[in-house]
Image: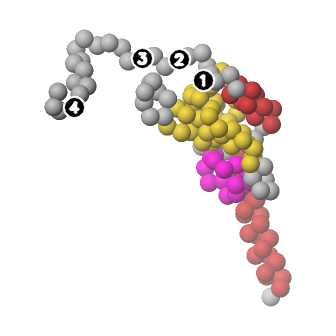
Amino acid sequence: MGKAIWIVVLVVLVVTAAFTWFTLTFVYSAGERTGFVQKFSRRGWVCKTWEGEMALVTLPGTVAEKFLFTVRDDALAKKISTDMATGRRMSLHYDQHKWIPNSCFGDTEYFVTAAELSDVIAAPPSANPDVIPAPSGGPDH
């Protein structure tokens, strides 16, 4: 009976290790997001990871969407911290890993692999003569 329990425990450990390796090795999607990094810190009780928050602003005056990300490379984390201090837009290249079983690898499924400052500024909406702007005072005006 004791040998069967050890075999079951061993199988569970091997399956867990294989699943973890699979989720960290294979990329579900890869992409790039550009915005303003507004929060970046190293955190965790036991497993310290770099976690950040980027505000994705498409046009001035619109509500920003938040992009939460993880950085696993200390040198890249230092670059992001330095570039963040400039207050300029940044482009973050990331790999998305689904179903990561433990937060020791990161709090998010988006792992940043590269970062660069972006000189591209969101263009204001173009003036289109065919579009009539809505009145600015409400229904009584």
Q: Is residue 138 left or right of residue 1?
A: left
- Residue at the (73%, 31%) spot, across then down: 81
Q: Which residue is denoted by mark 3 in the rendering? A: 124
- The quadrant holding residue 134 is top left
- Residue at the (83%, 82%) spot, across then down: 3
In magenta, the rendered stretch is: 97-109
Determine whether the residue tagged by mark 1 lies in a helix, strand or loop.
loop
Separation of disc 3 and disc 4 at Cα? 24 Å
Marks 1 and 4: in contact by CB < 8 Å? Answer: no
Marks 1 and 3: in contact by CB < 8 Å? Answer: no
Separation of disc 1 and disc 2 at Cα? 8 Å
Q: Amino acid at mark 4?
A: Gly
Q: Which residue is denoted by mark 2 in the rendering? A: 121
Separation of disc 2 and disc 3 at Cα? 9 Å
Q: Quick one: label 3 or label 4, which is nearer the N terminus?
A: 3
Q: Quick one: label 1 or label 2, which is nearer the N terminus?
A: 1
Is 81 one of the magenta-colored residues? Answer: no
Residue closest to the far left: 140
Marks 2 and 1: in contact by CB < 8 Å? Answer: yes
In the displayed structure, would residue 4 be above or below residue 140?
Answer: below
Considering the image in quadrants, where does the C terminus appear? top left
Q: Which residue is denoted by mark 1 in the rendering? A: 89
Determine whether the residue tagged by mark 4 lies in a helix, strand or loop.
loop
